[in-house]
Amino acid sequence: MKIKIDNEHELYNTFDKFEETLSEDLISYINNKEEISSIKEQENIEIISTKKIDEEKLKKAFKKYCDEQLILINRKQKINSTKQIGMLIVGILFIIFSIVLTNKVNLIILEIISTIGSFSIWESANSWLLQSKAIKYNKLKIIKLKNSEIKVTIQ
């Protein structure tokens, strides 16, 4: 992936006077390019500029961005796992409750309790099957980016 810039300041967020945070435009561009590339192929990033760029500062900011993204993804994984377990427990409790109440309450109430239990278990399974996979895929993309080689070229 090649990124051409005119000024080193384009790489960093305008609100970060210490230039330790990558610009939103740069992040967006890299993420868009990552979307079309394979998760298996290693991506190298080449910054092409007409002026000298502090390569170490750029690498440090890039690593900081990747580390922050991994922290956020790990939080999402933890929240998602908690949600899955909670919905599964609620579902099981409602199913058990409906079994215990068989022949003791109105059939309609029994069906409602059973449906709520089934729905909760379905939500848990849906979260595990779909959302967990998406979070894991995003984590793999960030790890791939973190391992990318960053090279600066002066033209």
Image (cartoon, grey):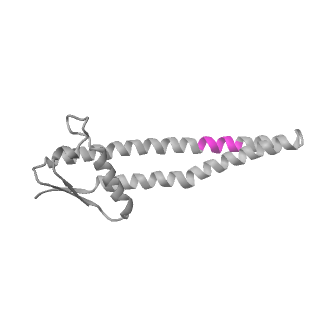
Q: Is residue 39 visible?
A: no
**Of 50 and 46, which appears nearest the observer?**
50
Q: In the picture, which quadrant includes the C terminus?
A: bottom left
**Of 102 and 79, which appears nearest the observer?**
79
Question: From which residue to which does the magenta span run?
Answer: 85-92
| Residue found at x 46% / y 51% | 135
Q: Is residue 97 visible?
A: yes
| Residue found at x 40% / y 42% | 72
Q: Residue furthest front?
A: 6
Res 50 quadrant in image: bottom left
3 horizontally vs 41: left or right: left
| Residue found at x 67% / y 40% | 90
Q: In the picture, which quadrant includes the N terminus?
A: bottom left
Res 9 quadrant in image: top left
Magenta span: predominant SS is: helix
32 horizontally vs 47: left or right: right
Above/below status of 45 relative to 68: below
Membership of 87 in magenta stretch: yes
Coordinates of residue 54 in the picture (x, y in percent): 13, 46
**Of 9 and 111, which appears nearest the observer?**
9
Membership of 89 in magenta stretch: yes
Coordinates of residue 106 in the picture (x, y in percent): 88, 40
Coordinates of residue 27 in the picture (x, y in percent): 31, 49
Coordinates of residue 147 in the picture (x, y in percent): 28, 55
Total number of numbered discs in the rendering = 0
| Residue found at x 61% / y 52% | 125
